[in-house]
Every structure is written in structure tokens, then in C-alpha cells.
Image (cartoon, rainbow, N blue to C red):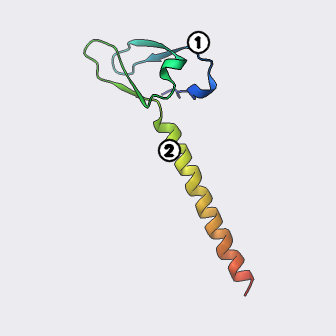
Amino acid sequence: MGQIPDTGQIRPATRILLICPECGQENSEFAHTLRGMASYSCRGDGCHYDFDLAGAHRDIGQSFAETFRRFYATFYALRGQGAR
């Protein structure tokens, strides 16, 4: 699967083409329409596929924060042992 770019970094007049992996429908929208949306529903006949526009970005942020929490916890634990 391709990755969905961050719509905050795309010009508002840019058209985004979302191709549904289930029905093959080409869904074309302006970036300003997609900006701020968490999901986008396929407009194919009888298709109920939802494009997840925010899921990957949320996961990256959460994993990034968790990595730094572990790093600082380890850093302070080691620093505390050296001070004794």
C-alpha cells in the first residue's frame, strides 16, 4: 500500500487521487477538503471502504513519544547509579 502524504504540507488547490483497494474506484479531492479529516469514504457504488487519513500519523507520534520516554527513563536510571 502507498502512504498518504501529510495534507498539511500540500497546497490547498492540489488534487489528491485516492484509489480504493477494494473496488478500484478513483476518488479525487482537493487537499483543502481532505485537510483535518480523519477518514474519507470511497464513493464507489456499493463500496464501504474508508481511507484512514490520520491513523498512521497518530501511531508515529505515539511511538516516537514512547521511545523518548524509555530513553529518558533509562538515562535517568543510569545517571542515578553513577551518582552513588
Q: CA distance from mark 2 to mark 1?
A: 28 Å
Residue 71 is situated, as x and y percent measured from the top left of the image, at 64, 63
Picture layout, residue 38 above or below residue 71: above
Residue 28 placement, left or right of 64: left
User: Looking at the picture, which amino acid does disc 2 mark?
Assistant: Asp
Q: Nearer the viewer, mark 2 or mark 1?
A: 1
The residue most toward the right is 83
Q: Residue at x 64, y 75 (%)?
A: 77
- Furthest toward the left, the residue is 46
**In terms of sequence position, does the residue under pointer 2 or pointer 1 come before the other?**
1
Judged from the image, the secondary structure of the residue bearing numbered disc 2 is helix
Seen at 49% across and 29% down, the residue is 36
- What residue does disc 1 label? 13
Answer left or right for 9 relative to 54. right
Question: Which quarter of the rendered picture does the C terminus lie within?
Answer: bottom right
* Label 1: few (<14), some (14–19) or many (≥20) C-alpha neighbours in 10 Å: few
Q: Amino acid at mark 1?
A: Ala
Which residue position is annotated with label 2?
Answer: 59
